[in-house]
Amino acid sequence: MNTASAVSAPPTFRPFEFGVTRASLREAGGARYLVADQALGCYARRMTDRLLHWAATTPDRPVYARRDPATGGDWRHITFVQALQAARSIGQALLNRGLSAERPLAILSENSLEHAMLALGAMYAGVPFCAVSPAYSLVSQDFEKLRHVMGTLTPGLVYASDWARYGRAIEAVTPEGVEVVLDSLADISGEARPASTFASLLATPPTPEIEKAMLATGPDTIVKFLFTSGSTKLPKAVINTQRMICANQQQMRQSMPVLAEDPLVLVDWMPWNHTAGGNHNFYMVVYNGGTLYIDDGKPTPALLGETLRNLREIAPTWYFNVPIGFEAIANAMQTDAELRRNFLSRVRQLFYAGAALAQPIWDKLYAAAEQEYGERVVMTAGLGMTESGPFGLFVTTPHSRAGDLGLPAPGLELKLVPMGDKTEVRYRGPNITPGYWRSPDATAEAFDDEGFFCSGDAVQWIDEADVHQGLRFDGRIAEDFKLATGTFVSVGPMRAKVIAAGAPYVQDVVITGLNLNEVGAMLFPTAALRRLSQLPPDASLADVAGSPPVQDWLQSLVNTLATTATGSATRVARALILTEPPSIDRGEVTDKGSINQRAVLKHRDALVRALHDGSAAHIATPAAKP
């Protein structure tokens, strides 16, 4: 065998078809408009039609499954016909309670079969629902975001899996008289609040009214509200209509034809209060007649083992994760032959989102597949957001690289608008939200004068000479960013928190961590820090930063910040003091003295990398996680 020719031979990929590979571009008014060279096909008027279709054609196929602790971890399945029956009964129960868009259903708990059936029942009845982030109830101490969410929704019914975990939050933010649904009423006995069991909803006999209610729904019916923070302090309720969800699923199906081929199998942990898990994946199996195995694991040291256990047992045909999740799986497959063999046995596509995937992780995934099956599994990515359903852009080739986004889905028009040295991508199409619930000002601000949704995401061409290759990610127009976990970091509140905690020694702070696992902080010091160091006035800033009194203070600061963090997006995991003042010539500071975060990160990229890989001098990290 000729070794040289073997090395240079192109890699072999498991068969996978890309639905969109070409696009049309036009220019007008200083902007560029990009659309796929493929029309959007017909799609369902409502997702309920797809549930009815599969319940009739594949009644015994599971649509959702989850391990049942009561049986030692065996999988409990809900078939399509069972899901339809549950939707009718639960939908009837919601109608009986007079729920509506003004009094929707709020679901506080994590992914579960009960959660799934409640979501389907609300959709069947035409009653909007909202899956609320469990962290707002379980992690927060002041319940500020939960109180805002509930105030925006004014729910008529609240579901939580158990009172022991969610009772304190419910009591703190839910008005008296609002009914609570729990899996068991054992812990709530003696409470004055009206309460019911999930089983009682499921046992509600459907009447002809539920079918009338379902038939009255249509493309403009609100299915759900998904809260997204964006760059604001408090989350906004994104309206999700039947048109938006159904059109987006059809866009996905045309962009990824594999979805319409062999029966789809997902193993997924993504939370349903986020658009990736709650829209993209949750409705994918309903639209295409597949099965979603709920993964109670997560890419964290404590829960990764459960994900690996599930992937050793259930072989997905399509797999979605955030970069840190793929990294953990890729590392595990290097020594776990059973995981490698089962996980890769029939998967046709890997899909990442939430942040950029580092190329070395791709290479490990490719190597594992080649080792086990002699071919690579296509790694894909795209771009979207809660307001776009979320699917928006998708890559066009198996040879894409980290950061590539590709072309718009059929039916979605992109507007590329110059914004200084960046280009913002804006969206218009049937999968775009009509706006934010009970927030007309925010809705008006989100759309331009042509009706395009302003994403705040920056893009650039993969190859300016060939638009058919599409676009690649170029960061955010604003300062906010995502970690490798897909967690959104709000830079403004973080800066204010660090400056306040660091007074009087911190003048400003630059937050780091884009596409990395942790948040970092680079501090611009005040003159007071020099006095704290007890060094001579002519001592260098480097000596000041490294002095024992200053290092003790910096350690105390990161420890203090860690005690008030509620998750990875609010936890400063590493910090250092900048020993070079901001440069006005490099645009790091304005003539008014304010710091340009993006400029500092750009010009001090090497220091950012050193901060996160641990090679920078005098780094402080929390003494212990809170």
Image: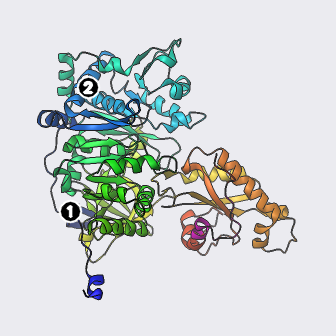
Whether residue 523 appears in magenta in the rendering, the answer is: no
Q: What x and y, as percent, mark residue 516?
A: 51, 61
In the image, which residues are magenta? 608-621
Q: What x and y, as percent, mark residue 297?
A: 43, 45
**Mark 2 Cα-neighbour bin, 10 Å: few <14, some 14–19, many ≥20:** many
For residue 431, side relative to residue 543 (left or right) = left
Q: Which residue sits at x=26%, y=56%?
A: 347
In the rendered view, how is the structure colored? rainbow
Sequence order check, earlier mark of 1 and 2? 1
Q: What x and y, as percent, mark residue 271?
A: 40, 42
- Say what amino acid the circle numbered 1 marks: Phe
In the displayed structure, 542 sits above or below 129; it is below
- Tags 1 and 2 touching, CB below 8 Å: no
For residue 103, side relative to residue 504 (left or right) = left
In the image, 94 versus 285, the foreground residue is 285
In the image, 293 versus 103, the foreground residue is 293
Q: Could you tell me which quadrant the N terminus lies in?
A: bottom left
Residue 242 visible, this angle? yes
Whether residue 611 appears in magenta in the rendering, the answer is: yes
Q: What x and y, as percent, mark residue 261?
A: 16, 52
Q: How many angstroms separate mark 1 from mark 2 (CA)?
A: 36 Å
In the image, 57 versus 611, the foreground residue is 57
For residue 537, side relative to residue 376 (left or right) = right
- Say what amino acid the circle numbered 2 marks: Ala
Q: Secondary structure at mark 1?
A: loop
| Residue farthest left in this picture | 57
Label 2: which residue? 86
Q: Could you tell me which quadrant the C terminus lies in?
A: top right
Label 1: which residue? 16
